[in-house]
Image (cartoon, rainbow, N blue to C red):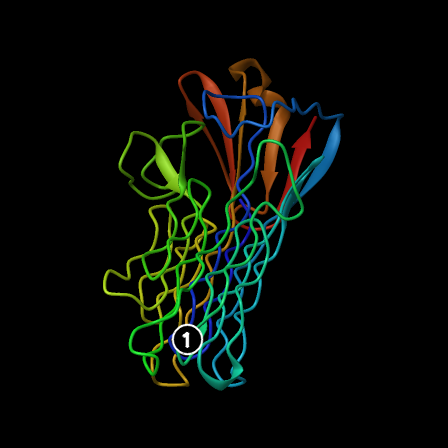
C-alpha cells in the first residue's frame, strides 16, 4: 500500500487512499498475479508517506507518496479538492481525492487507478453535486481500494487482505481479514472515513501504515490532518525463513501458519542470504 492523500482546504474533499496492490499469494480479488523472485542480497523497499492536508493556500490536499518493492509500485492517493473561492477537483492517484465545491458549483472527484494497473489499484473520488442551498459548501469522500468515494458522503471503503491477519496491521472491517486503503471523508452528514484507515471529518488523519486518506480540514483554516503512510507485507514459505532478514529493526519478521511474514512499516531492505 502507498501513502494516502491529504484532505482539501476548509472543509474540502477527503484524500484518496494509497494504491493497493498484491502479488500471487492469497484469495483477494485484488491480486496482481505477479510472482516475485529475489536474488541473494538486499532488496530495497520504499514505504510511501501520507500527503499533507492543505491548510493555508486554499488548494487541494497533497498527494501521498508511492510505495515500491521489486517490480510492484503502488501509487500514492490523490489529494482532496478544496471548497470556497479556490475550489478544486480531487487529485488523481492510486485512489482519487474527493471533489470540492464553490458556492454550490459541482467539482468532480479525482480519477483512481492512475496510472492504470490490472487489476485496478484503487477507485475514483466522489463527485460533489450542486449543494442546496447554493451558499452551503459541501465536499465528497476520497476513493478507497474497495470502492469509489460517495458524493457528499463518507470515504470509499478499503479492501481486506488475508496475507497476515494480525491485529497489529490494518483495521477491522465489515468482512474477515484486515482492511487497508480506505478513503478520507469529505464534509457530509455521515462524514466517517472508509474502513481501512480513512480519516473522519474534520481534520482526521489516515491511520498510519494503512494507506488511508485524510479527511478534509475543518472550518478553522489552520486545522489539518495527513494521509496514512503505506505498508508492505511479504509472505514466504516457512523453509525460506533462515535466508530472510529485514532492516532496520523497526520492521519485523515473524511467522503465521508455518510461513514467514515480513512487515515493512518504514523504508528499508529485505535481504536474501
**Residue 221 as seen in the image, left or right of residue 46:** left
In what quadrant of the picture does the C terminus appear? Answer: top right
Residue under the image location 50 percent in, 24 percent down: 260
The answer to whether residue 169 is visible is no
Q: Position of residue 251 (x, y in %)?
A: 52, 44
Q: Position of residue 162 (x, y in %)?
A: 41, 27
Label 1 SS: loop
From the image, tell me which residue sits under label 1. 224
Q: Position of residue 183 (x, y in %)?
A: 42, 53
Q: Quadrant of residue 163?
A: top left
Above/below status of 92 relative to 252: below
The answer to whether residue 269 is visible is yes
**Residue 33 as seen in the image, left or right of residue 263:** right
Q: Nearer the viewer, residue 178 or 213?
A: 213
Residue under the image location 71 percent in, 35 percent down: 71
**Residue 190 as seen in the image, left or right of residue 245:** left
Above/below status of 259 relative to 138: above
Above/below status of 249 relative to 41: below
What residue occupies the far left of the structure in this picture?
Answer: 189
Q: How many marks?
A: 1
Q: Position of residue 121 (x, y in %)?
A: 56, 40
Mark 1 surroundings within 10 Å by alpha-carbon count, few (fewer than 14), some (14 through 19), many (20 or more): many
Q: Nearer the viewer, residue 158 or 116?
A: 116
Q: Nearer the viewer, residue 255 or 214?
A: 214
Q: Nearer the viewer, residue 210 or 110?
A: 110
**Residue 190 as seen in the image, left or right of residue 246:** left
Amino acid at each position: 500500500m502507498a501513502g494516502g492523500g491529504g484532505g482539501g482546504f476548509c472543509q474540502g474533499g477527503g484524500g484518496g487512499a494509497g494504491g493497493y496492490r498484491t502479488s500471487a499469494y492469497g484469495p483477494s480479488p485484488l491480486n496482481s498475479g505477479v510472482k516475485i523472485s529475489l536474488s541473494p542480497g538486499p532488496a530495497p523497499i520504499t514505504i510511501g508517506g501520507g500527503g499533507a492536508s492543505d491548510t493555508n493556500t486554499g488548494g487541494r490536499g497533497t498527494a501521498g507518496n508511492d510505495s515500491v518493492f521489486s517490480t510492484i509500485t503502488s501509487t500514492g492517493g490523490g489529494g482532496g479538492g478544496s471548497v470556497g473561492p479556490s475550489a478544486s477537483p480531487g487529485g488523481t492517484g492510486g485512489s482519487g481525492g474527493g471533489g470540492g465545491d464553490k458556492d454550490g458549483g459541482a467539482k468532480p472527484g479525482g480519477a483512481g487507478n492512475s496510472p492504470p494497473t490490472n487489476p485496478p489499484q484503487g477507485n475514483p473520488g466522489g463527485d460533489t453535486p450542486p449543494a442546496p442551498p447554493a451558499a452551503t459548501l459541501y465536499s465528497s469522500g476520497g476513493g478507497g481500494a474497495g470502492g469509489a468515494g460517495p458524493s457528499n458522503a463518507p470515504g470509499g471503503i478499503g479492501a481486506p487482505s488475508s496475507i497476515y491477519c494480525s491485529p497489529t496491521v490494518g483495521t477491522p472491517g465489515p468482512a474477515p481479514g484486515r482492511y487497508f486503503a480506505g478513503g478520507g471523508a469529505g464534509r457530509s452528514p455521515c462524514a466517517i472515513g472508509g474502513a481501512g484507515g480513512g480519516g473522519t471529518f474534520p481534520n482526521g488523519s489516515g491511520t498510519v501504515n494503512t494507506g488511508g486518506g485524510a479527511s478534509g480540514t475543518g472550518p478553522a483554516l489552520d486545522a489539518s490532518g495527513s494521509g496514512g503512510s503505506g505498508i508492505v507485507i511479504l509472505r514466504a514459505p516457512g523453509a525460506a525463513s533462515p535466508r530472510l532478514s529485514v532492516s532496520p529493526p523497526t520492521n519485523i519478521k515473524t511467522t503465521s501458519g508455518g510461513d514467514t511474514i515480513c512487515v515493512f512499516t518504514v523504508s528499508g531492505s529485505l535481504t536474501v542470504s
